[in-house]
Image (cartoon, rainbow, N blue to C red):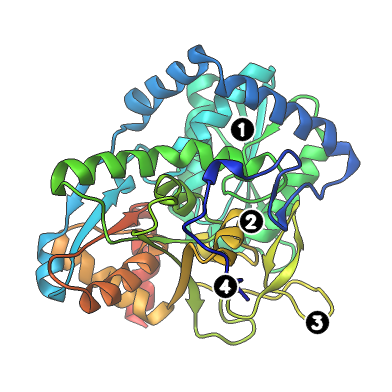
Amino acid sequence: MPSAADPSRLDRFTVPDASGHFGRYGGVYVPETLMTALEEIARVYEEAKKDPAFQNELRRHLKEFAGRPTELYFAERLTKHIGGAKIYFKREDLLHTGAHKINNALGQALLAKRMGKPRVIAETGAGQHGVATAAVCAKFGLQCVVYMGAVDMERQALNVFRMRLMGAEVRGVEAGQRTLKEAINEAMRDWVTNVRNTHYILGSALGAHPYPMMVRDFHRVIGQETKEQILAKEGRLPDELVACVGGGSNAIGFFFDFLEDTQVRLTGVEAGGRGIRRGDHAARFEGGKLGVLQGAKTYILQNEDGQIELTHSVSAGLDYAAIGPEHAFYRDRNRIQFAYACDDEVLDVFQLVSRTEGIIPALESTHALVHAIKRAAEMRPDQILIVNVSGRGDKDVQQVQKMLEK
């Protein structure tokens, strides 16, 4: 349960500590064979953070290749339809490859080059991180292998083809539930075997230190732009920010620069799936427990024996048993609130937003939109709510069509 920590006494730059801990969360729980690689990544990243040439090159690629800055868009018709607070969309769906994932993929690809690692591996669930990684590897001439659960490959067939079109090798994973968790397992096995010439571009704010910190930092641009844009448009900060949370990369990047603005409510939305019953959802704060998974200590859906529970979500990108450790830390400090959205609600709002705004959001992002619409209806017309539309729904339209036909 969250503690009674005072959210007004926050300094977001105090975490993680030197050992990669966000309070009791995070850390480094990996085989000894990966310790040298993680230490190298941490050292090289700290150097790159202070290197103006690296930062300038990253900014240039974010602008010229990815398409930053993305727009802050007033959803006028949706706002009128709901009849409450003004709803803005942060349009990460406008980025090259279709989602926020390109921010982190570019940053880590530059780190791979800096470390002299010619081979890159990645995992992907919804496919957007895999597509972003394939794109940056094509751009920089790096060998690319992407691991993807067989179930996700079937429901995200378009993204599988996009990855292969850009030269990536996509390896299907048939183990276990055949989704994101298993894809990460296989990527880590590959990394252990090929650690000398391979960099693992982990796609979310998960895993062992320094990944949660590093992925967060590469996505901070989302919140930095949002703050500047809303001040220009409205002359003040918003009342609430809402983002979907799988591992939590888009959300922590969106929230980070607002953490000390305690008048701004921050809400992460998990996958409620078919309902909060064992095996039917992926809402880690609804029945999850503290544990260790794939490199970090955090909230995990697990049974009494510590075995990882089955998960379910209509969205492949939220179908994961653990949440990023920084999210758990700020939940304990009452700074980030969490809610969940269920599959049926997501399908309804997916259609509503498409029809009212002409914007087809990713199923992942639609979880945030479900909660944002509920919140906006409870708020006054003079209040402001911003939703991070973390990706576009091109990848999901065939899946949604099949479900609606049923």
4 or 2: mark nearer the eye: 2
> What residue sits right under mark 3 in the picture?
304
Label placed on residue 326 = none
The Cα atoms of the two marked residues, 3 and 1, are separated by 38 Å
Left-right relation of 269 to 357: right
> What residue sits right under mark 1 in the picture?
144
- Looking at marks 4 and 2 on the same chain, the residue that comes earlier in the sequence is marked by 4
The percent coordinates of residue 398 (x first, y second) are: 36, 64
Label placed on residue 282 = 4
Say few, some or many: other residues with alpha carbon within 10 Å of mark 2 (under 14 / 14 to 19 / 20 or more): many
Left-right relation of 76 to 179: left
Amino acid type, callout 2: Pro
Say few, some or many: other residues with alpha carbon within 10 Å of mark 4 (under 14 / 14 to 19 / 20 or more): many
The percent coordinates of residue 348 (x first, y second) are: 29, 77
Q: Nearer the viewer, residue 142 or 211?
A: 211
2 or 1: mark nearer the eye: 2
Amino acid type, callout 3: Glu
State if disc 1 and disc 3 touch (CB < 8 Å): no
Residue at image coords 69%, 17%: 116
The percent coordinates of residue 57 (x first, y second) are: 45, 17
Q: Residue furthest top?
A: 53
The Cα atoms of the two marked residues, 4 and 1, are separated by 29 Å
Q: Split into 4 quadrants, where in the image is the N terminus?
A: bottom right
